[in-house]
Image (tube, grey):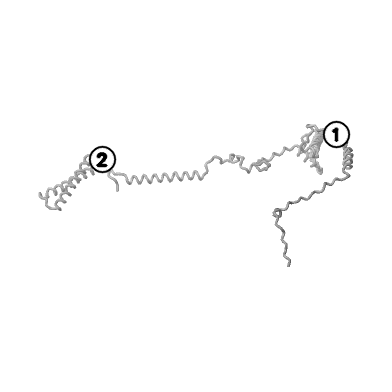
Amino acid sequence: MTTPQCAPDNVYSLLPPLEQKPVKPPRYISIFRPSVKHEAKQNKAQWKTMGPAKVAVPSPKNFLQKHSKEPKLQESKCRHEIYEMQCRKIEQDSKKLPALSVPRRTDHPVMGIQSKKNFINTNAVAAITRLPKKPQPLYVDSRQGDKYLLETSGLVPKYLKKKDYGVTPKYLTERKEEMKKAQKEYEASVLEHLKKKAMKVLSDEERKRLLEGLKKNWEEVYREFQCLPVKIDSIPKRLHKEKLETQMKQLEHDIQTIEKHKVIYIANE
């Protein structure tokens, strides 16, 4: 058997192969190029004299005005002619009429004659002599020109022209009267309550009776105090003695205050 032969190792085989760019062919140039250029120049030279070389610029005074291209109607002239014709006819008719005089009692009106009325002329005269209509008041609230009625917008002070403007409403006057009445009733009830709780002044007779009663009570307590034994050797006796002394002091204090003050007030309980 024959053994396979191995290729010898080479360092250059490890390097990547270089990319070879394809070579572009030369650009195509037509052989008729100079002849085409010559024909284009010849045709272009013929168009140089086409149209005026300089155009007259319009003057700024002859500018385009608004509604200048719209068809204009001669309504005003027709109306004016109709009005003049009507006036001339009225003047001629007035000249032909005889002088009017007061009719007699024996005269009778002419019957059976009908006069025709020219409604076209009368309507035209009425339209010419009629006063122009007043424009409806409007207001604009945006730059796009949105229009709205001025009367319903609230900007017109129409409420100032009302008869009851500035007059106090009835319900407010009634409410004020009710409040005053309630205030008077409250004050009256407070005065009655204070009168009931007011202090009463003692008269001279009551004051004398009160003094006599206090002195009499003091004498009774003093008599009982004198009846006590000289030697007090028990707690009940001592407590009874202290009680009598306090009663006597209180009665003396009350007698002094009543004798000192002539006018005495007593609160109603």
**Of residues 23 and 129, the one drawn nearer to the viewer in this rendering:** 23
Percent position of residue 144, x then y: 68, 42
Identify the residue at horizontal 79%, vertical 33% (top origin).
62
Is 1 above or below relative to 133?
below
Q: What secondary structure is found at the residue carrying circle 2?
A: loop
Q: Quadrant of the N terminus?
A: bottom right
Is 251 above or below relative to 48?
below
Percent position of residue 99, x then y: 80, 33
Q: Quadrant of residue 264?
A: top left
Percent position of residue 203, x then y: 25, 42
Q: What secondary structure is found at the residue carrying circle 1?
A: loop
Residue 197 visible in the displayed image: yes
Identify the residue at horizontal 12%, vertical 48% (top origin).
226
Percent position of residue 161, x then y: 59, 39
- Identity, as a three-letter code, of the amino acid under mark 1: Ala
Q: Is residue 223 left or right of residue 171?
A: left
Local crowd size for mark 1, using a 10 Å CA cut-off: few (<14), some (14–19), many (≥20): few
Task: Indicate which disc residue 263 carries.
Answer: 2
Is 2 above or below relative to 126?
below
**Of residues 251 and 99, the one drawn nearer to the viewer in this rendering:** 251
- Identity, as a three-letter code, of the amino acid under mark 2: Val
Earlier in the chain: of badge 1 and badge 2, it is 1
Distance Cα–Cα, label 1 vs label 2? 135 Å
Dots 1, 2 in contact, CB < 8 A: no
Considering every residue shown, the one lying at the far bottom of the view is 1
**Of residues 7 and 46, the one drawn nearer to the viewer in this rendering:** 7
**Of residues 44 and 259, the one drawn nearer to the viewer in this rendering:** 44
Task: Indicate which disc residue 194 carries.
Answer: none
Name the residue beneath numbered marker 1. Answer: 53
Residue 216 visible in the displayed image: no
